[in-house]
Image (tube, rainbow, N blue to C red):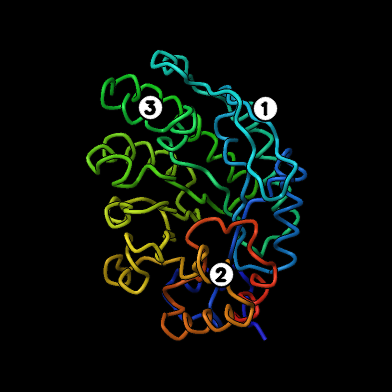
Amino acid sequence: MARYSHRERIEIILAGEKPDRFAGSAWRHFFHMEHDAAQTAEAMVGFQRTFDWDFVKVNPRADYHVEDWGLRQEWSRNEFRKHRKTAFPVNRPEDWERIRPLSPAAPVLAEHLRTVALVRKGVGREVPVLMTVFSPLAIAGRMVPDGALLAAELRANPERIHRALRAITETFRAYAAEIRNAGADGLFFATTQWASRQTISWAEYEAFGIPYDREVLRATEADALNLLHVCGSENYLRELAAADYPCRLYNWDADDPTNLPLDKAYDALPGRTLAGGIDRNGWFLHATPQEVVFQVQKLMRAHDGARVVLAPGCAVEPEAPRENYRAFREALG
């Protein structure tokens, strides 16, 4: 029998102490239910009621960040297919000049605050809830048809991009505070592909990423349960861990051979609580439930439950069998 609530278990781990069992969570998109606040919340709450994770990662449609600036898309009605983008806020370099700060009451942003409130009401107070927010640079990257256009522009016209990033940061600094007011415990703060050697240099991320990231994260207040999610291959996890972000959990694709493996992160990220271990594109997606149980048990033998929360390195593909989620959750105990 569990001795602690989900919230208590996470707080025990964050304090560096042994919990009653390993904590775990998983998340995925429900593309066919991402059209409005009520359906998105229904998908998140239903997923939590089915699997009883130790924290809920609210997984909204990825482009909610930029829709109020003019991104348009055709909604997918297929659970397994992404929405199709039809218009972008920035198509020419001079379009960056039109990016101005938005209010949290802007229609799509307000819709997603309602999602947070509905998820909080649906899962209760004893389950930590994290709302997905991309970094300002990642948000800028979703304003263009191809991220390479942003990378080129930040090198050619850095001041223009800094002005746009300032507008985005002002918007999401205010929005982060409202996310807490809506009931979230903190942010699932994602860099997407931008904190990677494959996209820009570390010096460029130091200039165009870190100052703006810190502002958004600090707006959540000191008690926030923020998780830093460093996406992609060849990522800057070590550098970001040293950058004094107000984050209490660190999540990345530790199964990617170009990234820091989970077992090496104990020393590389001293004092940090790590979230990972579930190979979302490998055995979790393709194995049988019995094999999932074997892999989860193997992880629990190899790792310290006072340092590691078992989780995927990014959103699990929608095609992953529901039986594998159940096997993962039951293996936790």
Give the secondary structure at mark 3.
Answer: helix
- Disc 1: which residue: 107
Side of 303 relative to 28 (left or right): left
Mark positioned earlier in the residue sequence (3 or 2):
3
**Which of the two labelled residues, at mark 1 and mark 3, occupies the earlier sequence position?**
1
Q: Are marks 3 and 2 in contact (CB under 8 Å)?
A: no
Image position of 54 (left or right of 117): left
Front-most of residues 258 and 296: 258
Q: Residues within 10 Å of mark 1 (few under 14, many from 20)?
A: few
Name the mark on residue 149: 3
Q: Earlier in the sequence, mark 1 or mark 2?
A: 1
- Secondary structure beneath dot 1 equals helix
Tell me which residue sits at (31%, 34%) in the image: 208
In the picture, measured across the screen, residue 243 lies left or right of residue 298, that is: left
- Mark nearer the viewer, 1 or 2: 2
Give the residue at mark 2.
284
Structural distance between the alpha carbons of marks 1 and 3:
27 Å
Please tell me which residue is depicted at 40% across the width and 35% down the height of the picture: 137
Q: Tell which of 109 and 105 is nearer to you.
A: 109
Please name whichever residue, 88 or 219, is drawn nearer the observer in this view of the structure. 88
